[in-house]
Image: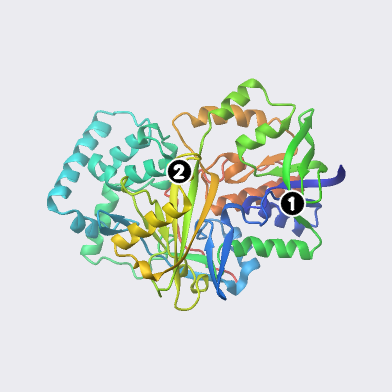
Amino acid sequence: MKKIIIDTLIIGAGPAGLAAAMELSKKGKEFIVVEKQSRVGGLSKTYEFHEEGLVFRTDNGPHRFFSKNQYLYDFIQELLHERWIQVKRQTRQYIEGKFYDYPVNALQALRNVGFLRAIRMGIDYTIAKVRYGILKHPIRNFADYVYANFGTSLGRFNMINYTEKIWGISAKDIHVDWAGQRIKGLNVTALLKDMFSSYLRIKNAKKPKTLVDTFYYPELGTGLIYETIRSKLESKGYQIMCSTEPQKLIHTNGRVTSVVCSSPEGDIEFMCKNLVESVPLKSFLNLLEPRPTPAVMDAQKLLTYRSQVYVFITLNKKTVTADQWIYFPESTNPIGRMSEMRNFSPRMSPEGKTSLFIEFFCTQGDEIWNMDERRLFDQTIAYLVDHHFIARNEVRSCYRIRLEDVYPVYDTHYQEYLTIIKKYLDTFKDFYYIGRPGRFRYNNQDHSLEMGILAARSIMEGKRYDIESIGTEKSYFESGELHVRTH
């Protein structure tokens, strides 16, 4: 077996791992990156599909870039320069055959739902304020949080249904943490204020653009960020070893001393001082030798993930809508979300053509996951045709992508299991577990980048930065002003 001695080994070439590598490279530190997949980018990679000389691109689930951290904006600007474009956002929900703006346009929503239904929603909201506000009914889960802030009818209309579609479990079994960043600060009072401001045309001419209405996006897809990092690192002589997968991690006296990986050239044993990794948490624990304690292994068995199936459709059509995303909250519709990639950047589709990226939330082994490819395509196209998004003769090609363990499930007990596991992992010296997979955290792209940067600084400066707190701000996750790029 080939042996390599290296100061730092980074497992995983997604946003977190490559951010760590980029930061270490700025100080000339020694490291190697290994990646299980054949390409870098992790959940943020971009695919290319070639059809008769035409190139259609899609992200692995479209990702826009936003952050409250100016350093991250500068980090991406330094990589991409003019290849990083500003995009005006349009996102809507499609419910019962009607479009609803997202974030919510209260005046439009009231017109769409109709007078009687709006009255029902108002009554339910009043009941909720009595129950949760005056009678102090405890907020024990996501369902309680939504009902307390929106009432039963409005809460179920879009938030509860869509959330249950994502996670595949009842909203009563979803931890209230899920509300902390996704809808914190949004409630009926805020919606009414917005409605009256719009109605009275109360506008502030100096109001800054927010993360809600404008975002930055790489012109060739989010994967451009990570392919650019790879090119820069390799030009400096660093190794990014793709198709290289960890098989076991040997530890002793509270330190991982070596990592055995399979690669196209055979098995390799990396002997390292520092280990940075973003392997899915459950998988990582199963790689350790000696094995973790029974309590840790029992806890990891209780953590669960949701997987995804994607259908990418290329079209002989100039455009479908002006939206980047359209959400489908209704439980009767298996589609979760639809993205039109050319609305992120015109270069994602050939001139005069467009594409749709359709997301299905599922669990590995269920009906959607196992569905025959042809049947999946037929059902997806039939829905889009029936609802007048496309005509059948406009379809060029369809492609299926399946990904395991995309979303860590925040059930009502996940923190109990996670605390046991993290307490064990935090006993290791010179070890940093980062990113959405590594920390079992449903975080955004910017949070993963920040985790990687702080892991690298911890190594370089010899002090441990607080990675756990990244992405835990208890505020609406899209709030804030849009940063100005530096030039």
Relative to 263, 41 lies left or right: left
Q: Which element is circle 2 on?
A: strand
Report the Cα–Cα distance between label 2 and label 1. 31 Å
Farthest residue in the top direction? 294
Against 44, residue 455 (above or below) is above
Considering only order in the chain, which callout, 1 or 2, is on the residue closer to the N terminus? 1
Of residues 109 and 408, the one drawn nearer to the viewer in this rendering: 408
Q: Residue at x 57, y 65 (%)?
A: 48
Q: Horizontal and vertical percent for residue 47?
A: 57, 62
As shown in the figure, which amino acid type bears the numbered disc 1?
Val
As shown in the figure, which amino acid type bears the numbered disc 2?
Cys
Q: Residue at x 38, y 43 (%)?
A: 165
Q: Residue at x 47, y 52 (%)?
A: 373
| Mark 2 or mark 1, whichever is nearer to me | 2
Q: Horizontal and vertical percent for residue 249?
A: 75, 36
Regarding residue 320, the answer to whether it shows in the image is no
Q: Which residue is mark 2?
A: 362
Relative to 282, 135 lies left or right: left
Regarding residue 251, the answer to whether it shows in the image is yes
| Label placed on residue 33 | 1
The part of the image, by quadrant, that contains residue 199 is bottom left
Against 406, residue 227 (above or below) is below
Quarter of the image where the C terminus is located: bottom right
Against 234, residue 295 (above or below) is above
Q: Which element is circle 1 on?
A: strand
Q: Horizontal and vertical percent for residue 483?
A: 51, 64
